[in-house]
Amino acid sequence: MNSAVVVEKPRLSVIEAADSPQDTDGFAKAVVDGLTAERKSIPSRFFYDEIGSGLFEKICDLPEYYLTRAEREILTTRAGDILADAPADLTLVELGSGSAVKTRLLIEEMLSSRERLLFTPIDISRAAIEDSADRLLSDFDTLKIVAVRSDYHTGLSILKQRNTGPELILWLGSSIGNLDRDEAVTFLQGIGTTMSPDDRLLVGIDLRKDASVLEPAYDDAQRVTARFNLNLLDRINRELGGRFDPGTFEHRAVYDPDRGRVEMHLVSWVCQTVAIDGMGVEIQFSKGETIHTENSYKYSLDEIDEVMQAAGLVRNGQWFDSEGRFSLNRMRKA
Ligand SMILES: C[S@@+](CC[C@H](N)C(=O)[O-])C[C@H]1O[C@@H](n2cnc3c(N)ncnc32)[C@H](O)[C@@H]1O
């Protein structure tokens, strides 16, 4: 995988894949493919432009969005246990690091017992990578960051060519929930193939619970999640010359207990045709037709074990918050 350093500052390098398509190309293709399919959808990774990443930070502070608080509680109270057998030369890798506010709890714990640490976050959002790196570097004098701005897979292959020692790979925030259960197995399997026997993977996984808790977490009273979802239409307007009127769409979040997933949709309340000038297409919507924008799968403890085993991984640590809502799962290769 060819890569290029695009930012070089003291203690910070940001790398991008040299031959990866520009953001807009990937977004444009996904939008046209997704909106011309029989059941309209847009992959959830496109939420995270600069505005979307900022809105996600606000979501993390909402009273209804218990996930971040629960995961932070586990990291605050159990960082010592999670890192108990960590080798001295461990590199901390993070998939979809976002603001990395929870990661700093692990960084702090590690730097309490060693002089230096290399942190290598991977995220598709340039804003998230650069803002979080600036904040972390000003708080931790002996931290070095080599960040990769790319999708998870590209980022992992780039890092594999650079990191040689043991790694703790973090995948927090229940981002695993955005994949179907089969995709989650394939994804974990893929990470497993890049792991050496000393490497560990720490995955934050949200647990199954009642719709009365789950639906408000994805449809809050202040309508921040609605703005986050509707920002996708604004993003199409801004970047691809779309002519969406976001006022004619509504945010919807519904829990499907059989599949164990919260689905987010954008619902067109009118029959309409929307042009996307930059792509030369027109998209037709019937009244009530939806664009499926995200799934957030929830797991039972058995389902966590099943997915891990199917991926060829073994659990060697599991922690919960005090209300039993969220889990952190540490894994190694079988
Ligand atoms: C739900 S947020 C979680 C952020 C943070 N890990 C947390 O726990 O709060 C998902 C993050 O993953 C990034 N992301 C989403 N899909 C990605 C992908 N396919 N490859 C790389 N990063 C991705 C987004 O930009 C965003 O920062």
Image (tube, rainbow, N blue to C red):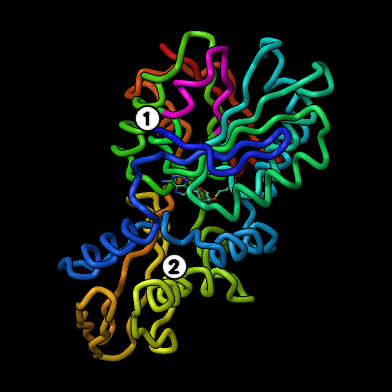
Image position of 109 (left or right of 265): right
According to the picture, the residue beneath numbered tag 2 turns out to be: 253
Please give the label number shown on residue 307: 1
* Magenta-highlighted residues: 158-170
Question: Looking at the image, is 8 positioned above or below residue 86?
Answer: below
Report whether the residue tagged 2 is closer than 8 Å to ligand 1. no
Quadrant where the C terminus lies?
top left
Question: Looking at the image, is 164 positioned above or below residue 183?
Answer: above
Position in image of residue 242 (x %, y %)? 34, 80
Image position of 84 (left or right of 139): left
| Magenta highlight on residue 164 | yes
- Please tell me which residue lies in front, 305 or 243: 243
Image position of 226 (left or right of 82): left
Visible in this render: residue 207?
A: no
Distance (Cα) linking label 1 and label 2: 25 Å
| Mark 1 Cα-neighbour bin, 10 Å: few <14, some 14–19, many ≥20 | many
Visible in this render: residue 143?
A: yes
Position in image of residue 13 (x %, y %)? 61, 36
What's the residue type where badge 2 is placed?
Answer: Ala
What's the residue type where badge 1 is placed?
Answer: Val
Task: Say which residue appears at 40% left-offset and 53% top-offset.
Answer: 261
Quadrant where the N terminus lies?
top left
| Magenta highlight on residue 88 | no
| Mark 2 Cα-neighbour bin, 10 Å: few <14, some 14–19, many ≥20 | many
